Image (cartoon, rainbow, N blue to C red):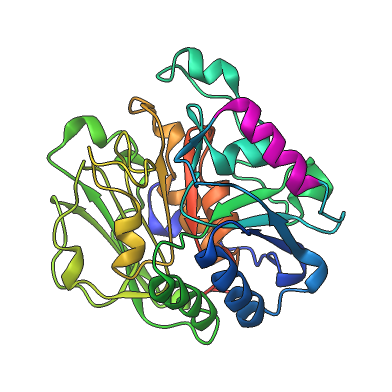
């Protein structure tokens, strides 16, 4: 599916605040503050609030430490919960797995034997379900970074604002000069207008865009993406770059996926360990577009767009749904 005209947008109900649990690290003051802010902003029921203790906020957890954390979280969930939002920046990885995928799908030790090997397929990939736990036995997970209270509150506000109106916007899908990081570019929809969604698709061959003020989607492939500061991301915008360690959020070797959120995107994605350039380990543009434009929330659309997600961390405000 590459042409705009081939996309079909069947209306999706999407997840609600009543189906989302938020997990607060009581050992991190910012997590506590943002937890209270998110609870109020999204009217999260008190019974959906989960409290855990993660001293020192390590970047990566061992499999054993993660299992202890998972048990803490799951003991506090009720059956209606379909998705989980963790309110902290770190930990974001479990060995070679992302913490979001380990929590949703279970820790995948096999992937860590050879991180460049094919991943385990996700049953949720391109799925029509709107109740992932009820129908598939998995709860979607996302991380909302809390290093900056000001930025975290702004991120939450963008997610809430996304539901107010469908605004004219553009989707930028780039094929860059970095050949190895263009493996998913073949799935990008062709340029054209989707009038009922007020969305202009721009399929471009360049390394970055400059000065765009209407960004709703921005998918590219580079180790570092230039000119982010001059862009305006619309409320609910999704943006990510295909590279090895974008999900190593506090690492220094490549651009962290946090840069997208800091510059105005509402959700993003990146891998926490060397995935090689399997397109299946990254968001597939047409699938992402189709589900988001059908009314899915950010957490649903992003999760549905990744076929092999064990190494990828999903970050941002999960309930953003600008096309619902």
Q: Is residue 280 left or right of residue 242?
A: right
- Magenta stretch: helix, strand or loop mostly: helix
Q: Nearer the viewer, residue 18 or 64?
A: 64
The answer to whether residue 217 is visible is no
Give the left or right position of residue 43, taking residue 175 as reference. Answer: right
Say which residue appears at 51% left-offset and 60% top-offset. 144
Q: Residue at x 33, y 37 (%)?
A: 245
From this viewpoint, which residue is outermost toward the right?
79
Give the percent coordinates (x, y) of residue 42.
64, 78
* Of 73 and 167, the residue lying toward us: 73
Q: Which residues are magenta?
A: 62-74
Number of numbered markers:
0
| Residue 21 visible in image | yes
- Is residue 71 rendered magenta in the image? yes
**Where does residue 161 sit, x and y in percent of width and height?**
50, 83
What residue do we see at 50% from left, 86% from top?
Answer: 165
Q: Nearer the viewer, residue 150 or 215?
A: 150
């Amino acid at each position: 599916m590459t042409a705009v005209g081939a996309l079909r947008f069947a209306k999706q109900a999407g997840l609600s605040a009543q189906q989302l649990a938020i997990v607060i690290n009581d050992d991190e003051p910012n997590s506590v503050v943002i937890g209270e802010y998110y609870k109020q902003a999204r009217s999260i029921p008190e019974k959906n609030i989960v409290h855990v203790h993660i001293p020192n906020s390590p970047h990566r957890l061992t499999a054993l430490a993660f299992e202890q954390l998972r048990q803490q979280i799951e003991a506090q969930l009720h059956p209606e919960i379909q998705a989980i939002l963790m309110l902290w920046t770190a930990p974001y990885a479990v060995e070679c797995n992302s913490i979001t995928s380990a929590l949703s799908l279970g820790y995948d030790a096999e992937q860590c034997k050879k991180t460049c090997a094919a991943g385990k397929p996700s049953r949720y990939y391109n799925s029509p379900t709107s109740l992932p736990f009820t129908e598939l036995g998995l709860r979607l997970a996302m991380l909302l970074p809390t290093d900056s209270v000001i930025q975290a509150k702004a991120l939450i506000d963008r997610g809430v604002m996304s539901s107010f109106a469908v605004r004219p916007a553009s989707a930028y899908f780039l094929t860059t000069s970095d050949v190895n990081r263009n493996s998913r570019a073949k799935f990008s929809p062709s340029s054209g207008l989707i009038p009922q969604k007020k969305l202009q698709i721009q399929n471009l061959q360049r390394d970055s865009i400059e000065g765009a003020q209407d960004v709703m989607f921005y998918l590219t492939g580079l180790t570092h993406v230039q000119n982010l500061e001059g862009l305006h991301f619309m409320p609910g915008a999704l943006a990510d770059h295909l590279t090895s360690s974008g999900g190593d959020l506090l690492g220094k070797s490549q651009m962290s996926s946090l840069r997208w959120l800091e510059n105005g995107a509402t959700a993003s994605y990146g891998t926490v360990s060397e995935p090689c350039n399997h397109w299946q380990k990254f968001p597939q543009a047409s699938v992402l577009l189709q589900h988001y434009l059908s009314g899915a929330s950010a957490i649903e659309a992003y999760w549905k767009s990744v076929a092999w997600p064990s190494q990828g961390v999903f970050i941002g405000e999960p309930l953003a749904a600008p096309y619902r």
